[in-house]
Amino acid sequence: MSDEPETVAPSATHRRGDATLKRWIASAGILSAGLFIGGFVLGDGLVRMKAAERTVTVRGLAEREVTADLATWTLSFASTATNLQSAQASTDKDAVAVREFFERMGFPAEALTPAGINVSNYTDNGTVFYTVRQRIVLRTEDINRAQRAVRNQAELVRNGVVLEDGSGISYTFTGLNSIKPAMVAEATKDARASAEQFAQDSGADVGGIRKATQGYFSIEARDGEAGGWGVGDTPFKKVRVVTTVDFALD
């Protein structure tokens, strides 16, 4: 057996060196490409983030005057006597007077609904007094006729009917859903006009809507506060909505 060391051919060593070098070059190329792509993606993301910051938030208002389409009038009246039967008879008489009043005003009988009877009592110097209270509700879509009835309610007083506090009429607008879409469009248009003014002042152009929030619809008296004893509400209303819109700035 020979103890001489194994000899490696120079050509094999040269080939192994070339392979190692190629692997290092390939790895470096992949790393460089990854850094380039990553930098491009990060840069593009930062640009898009910066563009997303270019927005303006404005509010748009839409208002519309409407007329109520439902009238509700709750009439409350009471009588007090030292015995229950007398107090009941007196309120029954008032109820007849109320129904006759509305009949003269041209309302059908079904427009009136009894809303309950309440009985209470108290003692004064040893004498027991009974109070019987009745309520009758008028519900109608004939707004003009309801207004005439309110203007003539003094007839009830002349017939001995004393209406209690809180007997005022209430007018309601029930057609809100039919005007909502158009009013939201008006409010959005108003918001865009504000955004365009802002953009003009800052040297930018208004782009698309990034986010929009619809506010609550409110229905109030057209001419400010209305009501008070014996007056009630007003049929003339103002519907109002405010929207908040984020517009992109180009």
Image (tube, rainbow, N blue to C red):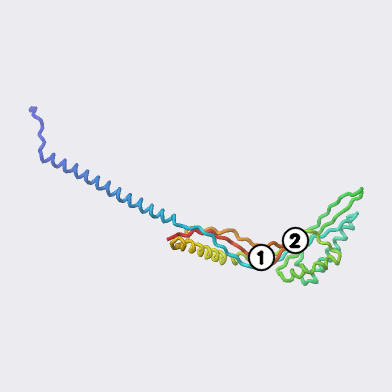
Image quadrant holding the C terminus, namely: bottom left
- Mark 2: few, some, or many residues within 10 Å (few <14, many ≥20)? few
What amino acid type is highlighted by mark number 1? Arg
In space, the residues marked 1 and 2 are separated at their CA atoms by 16 Å
Helix, strand or loop under label 2: loop
Residue at the spot 73% in from the left edge and 65% down from the top edge: 139
Q: In the displayed structure, would residue 16 be above or below residue 146?
A: above
What amino acid type is highlighted by mark number 2? Gly
Q: Is residue 146 left or right of residue 191?
A: right
The spot of residue 234 in percent (x, y) is: 70, 65
Image quadrant holding the N terminus, namely: top left
Residue at the spot 57% in from the left edge and 58% down from the top edge: 215
The residue sitting at the right extreme is 126
Q: In the displayed structure, would residue 144 be above or below residue 215?
A: below
The residue that label 1 is drawn on is 222
Helix, strand or loop under label 1: loop
Q: Earlier in the sequence, mark 1 or mark 2?
A: 1
The numbered mark at residue 228 is 2
